[in-house]
Image: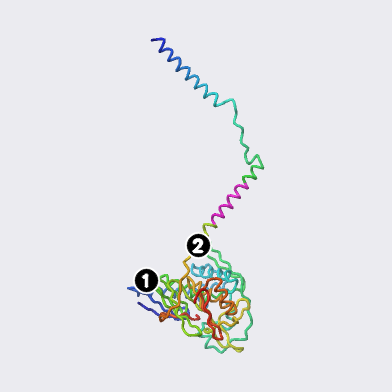
Amino acid sequence: MSRHAFRAMGTTVELHLDAEPADAALLAAEAEMARLERLLSRFLPTSELSRLNSGGELAAGPDLLAVVAAALDARELTAGRFDPTVHDALVAAGYDRSFELVAAGNGAPVLVGTRCGGGVAIDRAHGLIRLDPGVKLDLGGIAKGYAADRALAILAPLGPALVDAGGDVAVAGKPWPVGVETALGPLTLELSDGALATSGRDRRRWRASDGERHHLIDPATGRPAEGDLLRVTALAATTVEAEVLAKALFLAGDADRAAAEADALGIPAVLVTRDGRTVLAGGLA
Amino acid sequence: MTSHVARLYALAASLLALFLAWVGVSAAPWQADPPAPTAAEDPAAAAALARYERRLRQDARLVQRILEKRNREQAAPPPPTVRIVTAPPVATTRTS
């Protein structure tokens, strides 16, 4: 088993590949994630995403087109709970730099709800993305999921593979034991092909003058989401889907409603509440 | 003998004449083909043609949608299988 760890997309990425030789594939997967970060990060002024946000229109490459299209599909499928237009709300909440700088900062200004849900149009025939005036995109979680899926696609043809992109875990080729943090201690799920992603308010949080804030914006209010959930882990066929489902379940507002939705939709999910409850839903038992 | 051969020739000629007459009558060359009304001359025909073409286009779109749906369903990956185990994890998912 070969293992390779590196920094990308603001987090630590670990690749596991059960094949020999593995070095070339592992380095290719790392290069692919670095390439995608240069295209999709909102913190790099030269990225395609930053140029789209500053100009309002961009002839985008296939990766930005694919991620924006996936984000818009997710916005529709989740009735707006997942929304890539939360950029300004994140900035207003104080998440205006890479998270390491936000966490080390001196506090964000008083929070004002920021409108989300602005128009985004994709002209596939010409490869154009257009934003309504004043709209900017944040693709943080879904872009990392997309990069994890792309890295897995490089590794999986060579043998059983696992990609751990800072907690977004994608696997292929054999049953892989993957841990989930619960209120009762660690739980291990065995997963053969698919991905797990976790959304929560237990990390990427910071102090502000009026209290603690976190990065999960509720598009309905334009503010960090309230509710009794601490974090949600969701299972799906791809990391992009798992990212969207975990965030959408977290934004259900409370654990009972999120569990009911996961059961109804057949989404295997682990819900952990702020008061220490753990709920298994969507067929997990 | 000679008269017998002559009678056979006469019979064959009669049959040939009868066959040619039959073909001529069945062709009915005295009946002219009725002219088919063209869509340009007949507004009702033009409307019917337009309805037919519209229906064809609708059917084509419907078939296209059915094929696209079938392709999506066939291309969709099977749902991942998962179970709870006690083995130590290789990686741990966490808030990212």
Q: Are marks 1 and 2 in contact (CB under 8 Å)?
A: no
User: In x, y percent, where is residue A143?
Assistant: 50, 74
- Please tell me if label 1 and label 2 are on a single chain: no
Task: Estimate how packed mark 1 is, as few (under 14), some (14 to 19) or many (20 or more) residues with alpha carbons within 10 Å.
Answer: some
Q: CA distance from mark 1 to mark 2?
A: 27 Å
| Residue A259 on image: x %, y % | 56, 76
The chain letter for the residue carrying disc 1 is A
Residue A159 numbered mark, or none: 1
Task: Spot the residue most to the right.
Answer: B43
Q: How is the image coloured?
A: rainbow
In this picture, which residue range is highlighted in magenta? B50-64
Q: Main secondary structure of the magenta part?
A: helix
Q: Nearer the viewer, residue B65 or A43?
A: B65
Q: Which mark is residue B73?
A: 2
* Viewer-proximal residue among A100 and B16: B16
Residue B68: percent from the left, percent from the top? 52, 59
**Dot 2: element:** helix
Q: Chain of mark 2?
A: B
In the rendered image of this protein, does residue A142 appear above or below residue B39? below
Instruction: Compare residues A249 and A4 and report the one nearer the observer.
Output: A249
State whether residue A118 appears in this view: yes
Residue located farthest toward the front when viewing the structure as drawn: A285
The verdict on residue B56 being magenta is yes
